[in-house]
Image: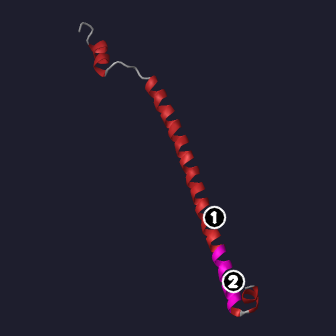
Amino acid sequence: MLTFLFERTAGKAVSLFALAAALFGWWQLDRLQQRNLGAANERAEANEKAGELVDKGHAARDGVDERTALDRLRERYCGDC
């Protein structure tokens, strides 16, 4: 078996093809892993920004006067209503 791989031209071609296929497969898996890692980081950043926006929204909502616009108009322009 080893004489076929190392001494014959066809064996050298087969081993070279196997090495190239292994390197190509490893490169594809590494590229996929890097892409998934980048997507996970993007999602984490987006969730963090969304949390900040939600907190700002809650802070803005808590500072608002809870009276309706009609109540404010009555107080301002209709003292006897």
Q: Main secondary structure of the magenta part?
A: helix
Nearest to the observer: residue 45 or residue 27: 27
Question: Which numbered mark, 1 or 2, is in the foreground of this view?
Answer: 2
Which quadrant is home to the C terminus? top left
Horizontal and vertical percent position of residue 70: 28, 19
Task: Identify the element where label 1 is drawn.
Answer: helix
Say what amino acid the circle numbered 1 marks. Answer: Asp
On residue 30, which mark appears?
1
Q: Residue shown at 53%/36% (left/top)?
A: 52
Q: Is 16 included in the stretch rendered in magenta?
A: yes
Based on the displayed image, in which of its 4 quarters is residue 3 positioned?
bottom right
Q: Residue shown at 30%/16% (left/top)?
A: 71
Question: Magenta span covers which residues?
Answer: 10-22
* Residue at image mark 2: 16
Based on the displayed image, in which of its 4 quarters is residue 69 positioned?
top left
Nearest to the observer: residue 56 or residue 30: 30
Nearest to the observer: residue 64 or residue 21: 21
| Pointer 1 local density, CA inside 10 Å: few below 14, some 14–19, many at least 20 | few
User: Which of the marked residues, 1 or 2, is nearer the chain's N terminus?
Assistant: 2
User: Residue at the bottom extreme?
Assistant: 9
Q: Residue shown at 40%/20% (left/top)?
A: 65
Horizontal and vertical percent position of residue 38: 59, 55
Based on the displayed image, in which of its 4 quarters is residue 16 positioned?
bottom right
Above or below, comparing residue 60 to residue 3 in the picture = above
Horizontal and vertical percent position of residue 56: 50, 32
Q: Are marks 1 and 2 in contact (CB under 8 Å)?
A: no
State how far apart marks 1 and 2 are (Cα): 21 Å
User: Horizontally, is 48 left or right of 14 in the view?
Assistant: left
Nearest to the observer: residue 8 or residue 44: 8
